[in-house]
Image (cartoon, rainbow, N blue to C red):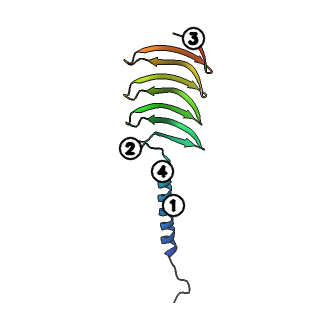
Amino acid sequence: MSVFRYDSRHKVVAGILVIVVSAVGFYLRDREKPKFDNGQAKQIGNQVDGRNHGLWIWYFPNGKKKMQGTFVHGKREGIWITFSEKGDTLSEATYVNDKLNGRYTIFDDRNRVEKTLFYKNDQVQKTN
């Protein structure tokens, strides 16, 4: 007869605890995403250390893109595009370190270039 008896109930308790914590985490993560009344997401994107990071996309209630652009540690970076509710491109802007730097193009309702501006540190340098 053995003095020591192995009891594995702690594994079951630990397993249930892991499942409950995971379920609550997924529920809270999905609940935090802002949505329109029709269930369509208002925006999608990721955060790192509490700051927007990576590609972010904003939507109209009809599901079409409203705006998209990339963040690097909370600062706008690269090409940012805005769209009309029909899906046409309205503008394209270039950001460096969260400031307009480079070409900013405005399109007309036929998707043709209407105006081009050039920026440096949020200041217009040249207009075409």
Mark 4 or mark 3, which has the lower sequence index? 4
Q: Are marks 2 and 4 in contact (CB under 8 Å)?
A: no
Whether residue 50 sits left or right of residue 111 in the image: it is: right
Mark 1 or mark 3, which has the lower sequence index? 1
Q: Which residue is mark 4?
A: 31
Residue at 58 percent across and 22 percent down: it is 100
Residues under labels 2 and 4: Cα distance? 15 Å
Rendering coords of residue 38 (x, y %): 38, 44
Q: Amino acid at mark 1?
A: Val
Mark 2 or mark 3, which has the lower sequence index? 2
Q: Amino acid at mark 4?
A: Arg
Front position among marks 2 and 3:
2
Residues under labels 4 and 3: Cα distance? 45 Å
Secondary element type, mark 3: strand
Secondary element type, mark 2: loop
On screen, 102 above or below 58? above
* Residue sticking out furthest to the bottom: 1
Q: Nearer the viewer, residue 92 or 16?
A: 92
Residue at 57 percent across and 11 percent down: it is 126
